[in-house]
Image (spheres, rainbow, N blue to C red):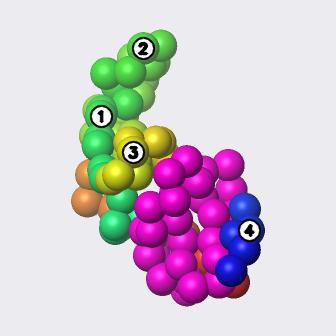
Amino acid sequence: MSTQRISETLVGDGNRVACRACGHALARAGTAWKPHASLTTVRVKDLPGASCATNALLVLRRFSCPSCGSLLDTETALPDDPFLNDVVAM
């Protein structure tokens, strides 16, 4: 089955969502893929160029492929906020 590009970092084949760089399957189509990615977080306040007015609790979440380490997506949130889940229907 052929793959279709979902984003710069993700592809799908109609049944699954996968890392575009290495093809590692992250989730079935129609389900959230972010819970299956590797997650790192850093406080936005600790990032270079952050304003002193930045909320001290705000974090940058980085979702990476657990197979090859390619960065798949990022989001900013408060630590206890749920993921902004991307569900891809093909």
**In the rendered structure, does residue 18 fall within the stretch colored magenta?**
yes
Tell us which disc is closer to us: 3 or 1.
Answer: 3
53 on left or right of 90:
left
Badge 4 or badge 1: first in the primary sequence: 4
Circle 1: residue type: Val
Circle 3: residue type: Cys
- Residue matched to label 3: 68
Q: Are marks 4 and 1 in contact (CB under 8 Å)?
A: no
- Residue matched to label 2: 48
Please tell me which residue is depicted at 59% across the width and 54% down the height of the picture. 20
Please tell me which residue is depicted at 44% across the width and 19% down the height of the picture. 50
Badge 3 or badge 2: first in the primary sequence: 2
Q: Residue furthest front?
A: 1
Badge 1 or badge 2: first in the primary sequence: 1
**In the rendered structure, does residue 10 fall within the stretch colored magenta?**
yes
Nearer to me, 40 or 51: 40
- Residue matched to label 4: 4
Please tell me which residue is depicted at 26% across the width and 59% down the height of the picture. 80
Q: Main secondary structure of the magenta part?
A: loop
Span shown in magenta: 6-33
Q: Is residue 76 visible?
A: no
Please tell me which residue is depicted at 34% across the width and 68% down the height of the picture. 35
Tell us which disc is closer to us: 4 or 1.
Answer: 4
Q: Are marks 4 and 2 in contact (CB under 8 Å)?
A: no
Tell us which disc is closer to us: 3 or 2.
Answer: 3
- Residue matched to label 1: 42
Q: Quadrant of the N terminus?
A: bottom right
Structural distance between the alpha carbons of marks 4 and 3? 20 Å
Structural distance between the alpha carbons of marks 4 and 1? 32 Å
Q: Identify the secondary structure beneath mark 3.
A: loop
Structural distance between the alpha carbons of marks 3 and 1? 20 Å
Structural distance between the alpha carbons of marks 1 and 2? 11 Å
